[in-house]
Amino acid sequence: MSDAIIQTDHSLSTILDNLSTAVILLNDDLNIQFINPACENLFQISFKRAYHKNLDDIFYINDQFNLRLKHSLETEHPFAEHEITIDSLFSGKLTVNYTVTPLLHTGSKSYLLIEFTHLDRHLRITREEKLINEQNATKNLIRGMAHEIKNPLGGLRGAAQLLERELPDKNLKEYTQIIIGEADRLQNLVDRMLGPKIVPQKQDINIHQVLEHVRQLVLAECSEGIHFNLDYDPSLPYFSADPDLLIQAVLNITRNAIAALDNNGEITFKTRPVRHFTIGHKHHRLVLQIDIMDNGHGIDDELIEQIFYPMVTGRADGTGLGLSIAQSLINQHDGLIECISQPGNTIFTIYLPLELNDA
Ligand SMILES: Nc1ncnc2c1ncn2[C@@H]1O[C@H](COP(=O)(O)OP(=O)(O)O)[C@@H](O)[C@H]1O
Ligand SMILES: [Mg+2]
């Protein structure tokens, strides 16, 4: 039969199954004979549905594409293109590199193998790596500075106390008190810049407990003009995490959303599972996605690149620590925070790995 190449060659289909690049096998009528799981994922179509279909039923590249495929079959010449935009029927616009390879005849049949490398995914991982590296670099800088400030600060405070005891005039105490008070304030700030040193106390939790806890907390503090929408996926499993740290992270993000809403607007909490997701260099089979969305004024393009850095704030009364602390708490759970924003729609997304025993 036409799919003999797959049926007769088990090792070939095993190899294709395990490739992380998306692969499509076509017969000489350009009907789909096989797609591998990476390809099912890329185009959001199952092998069953794709089988015997034409490529047009799955995606469109350009008008010449089918002609080039035919030509490649006839001449047995492979071809390739880079950074091509594909309109996929089920997964939208994708940027890919692809190569087309005519396969040697088996009997009288010839086949074409198309291999896709999904570039958006590469770009995303590179961007993520850059983000994590930058955050680590800044964090180290801040930590170093905070330590340098802490030591002289202790000396300053101690000296002010000694001086206070020796003062001949009690009225002058007012000034030493200012020194001590300000040293304490700086000390407090530096401690917060150094971030929580807490070791996570992990237990089996459900993410919705965390979100509900935060919602109750902020409902008590915010005005009645703010409404919460909940879009929870109840099938999400329990996972191992420190509930207090996650509450703090979600709270920091949610408080920013409330500040952006100016007493009037909507906040949405949404949870979903995501399969096959890479955070940094690590691939996870299952990841939890938490979206915290608001319809407030949004974040300016210049600011958004920096909001996770400590001391970056867009508010006169802000400390700029909320998001950098949230980021560090999520990092302690091997997770990631991302943000996209436009006026009327700001989304902070937290990803947390769900594998319980991931070595
Ligand atoms: N949901 C949001 N909508 C609009 N701006 C936001 C939002 N979340 C964060 N921001 C911006 O990011 C800045 C940094 O936030 P954060 O680190 O929590 O520090 P702070 O809240 O003390 O300013 C905020 O000052 C604000 O300008
Ligand atoms: Mg904040």
Image (tube, rainbow, N blue to C red):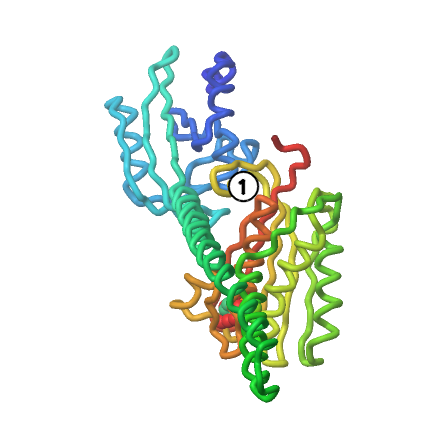
Label 1: few (<14), some or many (≥20) within 10 Å? Answer: some
Looking at the image, residue 87 sits to the left or right of residue 291; the answer is left
Residue pointed to by mark 1: 277
Q: From the Cβ of disc 1, is ligand 1 less than 8 Å away?
A: no
Q: Nearer the viewer, residue 165 or 66?
A: 165
Residue found 63% across the figure and 47% down from its top: 288
**Secondary element type, mark 1:** strand
Identity of the residue drawn at 62% across and 66% down? 254
Regarding ligand 2, which quadrant of the image does it lie in?
bottom right
Q: Nearer the viewer, residue 18 or 315?
A: 315
Residue 346 appears in view = no
- How many tags in the picture? 1
State the quadrant of the C terminus.
Answer: top right
The residue lying at 40 percent from left, 40 percent from top is 118
**Residue type beneath disc 1:** Phe
As drawn, 115 above or below 294: above
Residue 86 location in percent, x, y? 38, 46
